[in-house]
Image (cartoon, rainbow, N blue to C red):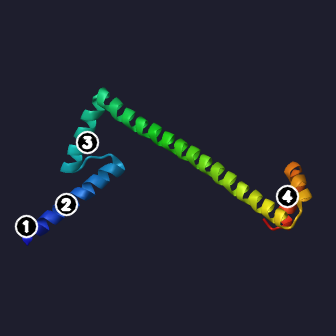
Amino acid sequence: MAARLRHVAEARSDLRDMLHYVQTGKADGALSRDIDSLVLTYNQDREWVNRVLTYEQDTEIRCQRARAEGIEQGIEQGIEQGIEQGEARLLALVQRLSAAGRLDDLLRAADDNAYRDALFEEFEL
């Protein structure tokens, strides 16, 4: 039990040390000194730094492309849905005018957008 408590206390101490290092950049404990040493080593390796930056940049580019593709797909789907809804609306108007025997109104609606819109309102479509 005492060994376990000692282990927990050491872990908490290391965590405090690491958080202090992240916040201040000061390596005061064993863990932060190890981390700081690795940071210095890797920062001197420009090829590695460039590879990491390139990976991050590549990831950002991929995210931007994925967002653009998603937007494009959304627009395409929206257009398709809009066309389908418009066709259904027009078909409903044709059916109602035909059932009411208003063929002259149907022919006029085919050429006159304003008149067609008025008929949509009349039939609440």
Distance between mark 3 and mark 1 Cα atoms: 29 Å
Circle 2: residue type: Ala
Question: On the image, numbered disc 3 is attached to which residue?
Answer: 36
Distance between mark 2 and mark 3 Cα atoms: 18 Å
Circle 3: residue type: Asp
Question: On the image, numbered disc 2 is attached to which residue?
Answer: 11
* Image-based side of 62 in relation to 122, left or right: left
Q: Secondary structure at mark 3?
A: helix
Task: Between residue 72 and residue 60, name the one nearer to us.
Answer: 72
Sequence-first tag of 2 and 4: 2
Q: Within 10 Å of the Cα at label 4, are there few (<14), some (14-19), or many (20+) other Cα atoms?
A: few
Question: On the image, numbered disc 1 is attached to which residue?
Answer: 3
Who's the residue at 84% across and 63% down the image? 97
Sequence-first tag of 3 and 4: 3
Dots 2 and 4: beta carbons under 8 Å?
A: no
Sequence-first tag of 1 and 4: 1
Residue 117: image tag? 4
Distance between mark 1 and mark 4 Cα atoms: 82 Å
Give the quadrant of residue 91: bottom right
* Image-based side of 85 in relation to 55, left or right: right
Q: Position of residue 44 (x, y in %)?
A: 28, 29
* Image-based side of 8 in relation to 23, left or right: left
Q: Within 10 Å of the Cα at label 2, are there few (<14), some (14-19), or many (20+) other Cα atoms?
A: few
Quadrant (top left, top right, bottom left, bottom right) of the C terminus: bottom right
Q: Position of residue 120 (x, y in %)?
A: 82, 62
Q: Secondary structure at mark 1?
A: helix
In this rendering, the answer to whether 99 lies above or below 86 is: below
Q: Secondary structure at mark 2?
A: helix
Distance between mark 3 and mark 4 Cα atoms: 71 Å
Quadrant (top left, top right, bottom left, bottom right) of the N terminus: bottom left
Q: Position of residue 16 (x, y in %)?
A: 27, 58
